[in-house]
Amino acid sequence: MCHACVMEDVKRSMMSRRSLFAGAAAAGTAALALGALSARPALAQSTGKVVDLTHVFDEKFPTFDGKPGIAYEEAVNIDQAGYQLWKLTIFEHSGTHIDAPLHFSKDGKSVAELAPESLICPLCVIDLTAKARDDANAMVEPADIEAWVSANGEIPKGACVAMNSGWAAKVASPEFRNDAAGNFAFPGFSTAATDMLAGMEVGAIGVDTLSLDPGNSTDLAVHHSWLPSGRFGIEGLANLDQMPAKGATLFVGAPKHARGTGGPARILAMM
């Protein structure tokens, strides 16, 4: 399906599903508020090692629509003024970035309205690399969550559950975004998995790909269900292969611009 067709399907789906998730926003907000509280035990036991989960953001970084996500214009020249300054033009959903509830709901929380305590939370990493090697559009499914819980214990309320598909290693290659035929192709979450995580009062999900949904999604169903519920997502994460399955604490350096549907962010983890 062409990219324009995908976006038209998304617009129609947004109109039809909006009312379905309005009642879930309060539950999502409550889950987010648990993040910092749940992170305290891990912080107390941390080694102090910090891992940067953020890609360097420049004009070459892959984007959903294929257009550069950032443009630089010289505002002040150092040879002329003694200091230098860039004027930046940035698309909110580019680079390593946040998806706020407002991104897929008319009246959801903007990125500026995210509760501060939700931006510090336990990090749980689900390893999807084996599945992703066999299927470029592999998904985190309920069975993957159940296997994680069996191996690591319960997922803390308010946590961020991130998918490590190994896709970050492809970021400089066309394969990060498309298959050989030019179609979107990258792993993501299934709605069955995110519905399960919502029931566990998880506060956020994260991916090392371009989208919370897999590349072959035609309706962006995870975006339509997860974000209007009051929760947020993180896309384009780096270095998840350096993280343990559990025990790290995530620090989300979300932007704080009014009416923001999301934005590039500095994402750090303490182990």
Image: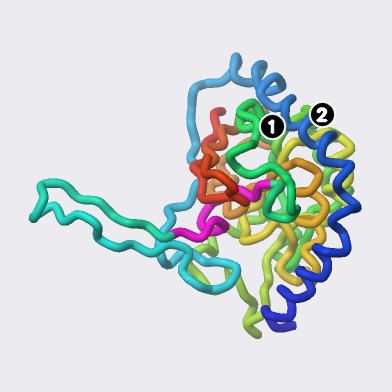
The earlier-in-sequence mark between 1 and 2 is 2
Residue 205 at x, y = what percent?
71, 44
Residues 193 and 259: in front is: 259
Residue 70 at x, y = what percent?
43, 62
- Magenta extent: 90-100
In three-dimensional space, the C-alpha distance between marks 1 and 2, rounded to whole angstroms, equals 9 Å
| Number of disc labels | 2
Q: Is residue 58 magenta?
A: no
Residue 193 at x, y = what percent?
85, 49
Q: Which residue is mark 1?
A: 246
User: Residue 134, can we see it?
Assistant: no
Identify which amino acid the numbered label 2 is placed on: Gly
Residue positioned 75% across, 53% down in the render: 105
- Please state, as top left, top right, bottom left or bottom right, where the N terminus lies in the image: bottom right
Looking at the picture, does residue 7 appear above or below residue 89?
below
Asked whether disc 1 touches disc 2, contact meaning CB atoms under 8 Å apart, the reply is yes
